[in-house]
Amino acid sequence: SQVWNQYYTLLGPLNLIISDIDSKEIKDINVRNMVVGEALVWRAYAHYKLLQYYSPYKDGRLGIPMFLNPTDNAGNAEPERENQSKVYAQIIEDLNEALRLLEITPTQSWNFAYRKDFIHSFMADIYWYKADGGAGKESDWKEALVHAEQAMRGRNLISGGAKSLGELFDCSPEKMNVVTINDEFFIRIVDGYEAQKLSFISSYYVDRTNGKITQEYLSLYGEDDIRKSAYITSAGRMAKYNLGQTRAERGFGAYMPFRLANAYLIAAEAAVHCGDIQKAISFLKTFKLSRYTSVVAMLPTDSEALLTEIRLERKKEFFAEIDARWLAMKRYGESFTRSVDMKTFTLASDDFRYTFPIPYSEISTNKKIEQNPGWN
């Protein structure tokens, strides 16, 4: 319920800004465009995260409620769940409008998410996630490739080894207020309470018996993989984010949505689905050259083997990055097994628990809301 409330609370003022700003006297049209453009990007983001968490991946019928004009029937509205296609259409429409505004009013330094590279990276992620789901279309992979290439344009992956990669995520007190600019991310949010996001770090990566990284994850990284020392200490503990040992220090974290590495892996995967194996190999090779110290081995030319390689790199790259692993598992229909207190628990492929339950408070207030399958 916390996540549901956070994102719908965020949507309230965003909808007010977008729907009401034209009724106000704003002398500077550029200010108007920047404010609306930023609001559109964050509205798309909130709808996207709600869709990922609360909508069954394969059931296109069950999307999320959208209520774009908050002044209509204020306090008494009971919006129905829209289907996934309609929600995706609204998300994409908002981002395309933001791109249109950027053509009229280019980004200014005070804006945060109102920027072309971030929006293209965001849209690449949308089409990648959507492609095999209940609202997927044949054109999604082509769109994912187009937007990923736009996001990658003029930006380079890290070439400075493990130290440079580790600094990207550094959230130590010394670095908290230092302005960090790097091609690897488009926007970077550092905070102490992860208030607008969800962390699954302890769920997949940490062995609850000893507090160390699970053997499953440790075994993924070879000695030539710079991520091994950038993400994990020599003692087998979390190095990513460079967090301290006190509760206050551990609360800090960095959030870099849709970063450049994601665009490269989406581009490679999309190229495979578009039938361009050589292009996919080129993207994956460029990516791997920035993550390994040894010469990159010959990459497979078989499409399925190449897709397996891309998915493995995704699993290693986004280690402990908020919800990245969870959503990749949901998107690919993976199963997961772990032991806790001598008991074994399994999350099956396409398990209903990959989708959060609609909060009871919402269902009891809005009679038009249908609970997600399995949670009744």
Image (cartoon, rainbow, N blue to C red):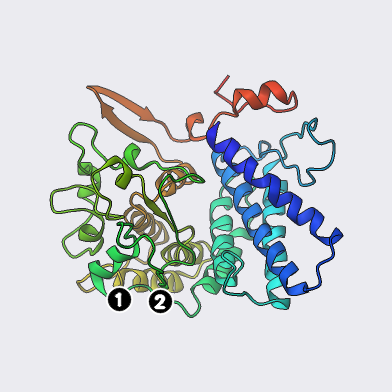
Which residue is identified by label 2? 156
Q: Nearer the viewer, residue 316 or 177?
A: 177
Q: Residues within 10 Å of mark 1 (few under 14, many from 20)?
A: few
In the figure, is residue 370 to the left or right of 234?
right
Give the position of the N terminus as an image quadrant.
Answer: top right
x and y, in percent, of residue 111 in the image: 59, 68
Task: Count numbered badges in the picture.
Answer: 2
Q: Which residue is mark 1?
A: 159
Q: Residue furthest bottom?
A: 154
The residue at the point 59 percent across, 26 percent down is 373
User: What amino acid is at disc 2?
Assistant: Asn
Marks 2 and 1 close (CB-CB < 8 Å): yes
**Vertical side of 90 occupied by 168: above or below:** below
Give the amino acid at mark 1. Ser
Position of 350 with respect to 203 (left or right) is right
Task: Please identify the quarter of the rendering in which residue 360 is found.
Answer: top right
**Residue 62, image x and y in percent?**
66, 36
- Residues 259 and 242: in front is 242
Whole-percent x, y for residue 139 in the image: 64, 61
The answer to whether residue 191 shows anywhere in this view is yes
Of 250 and 215, which appears nearest the observer?
250
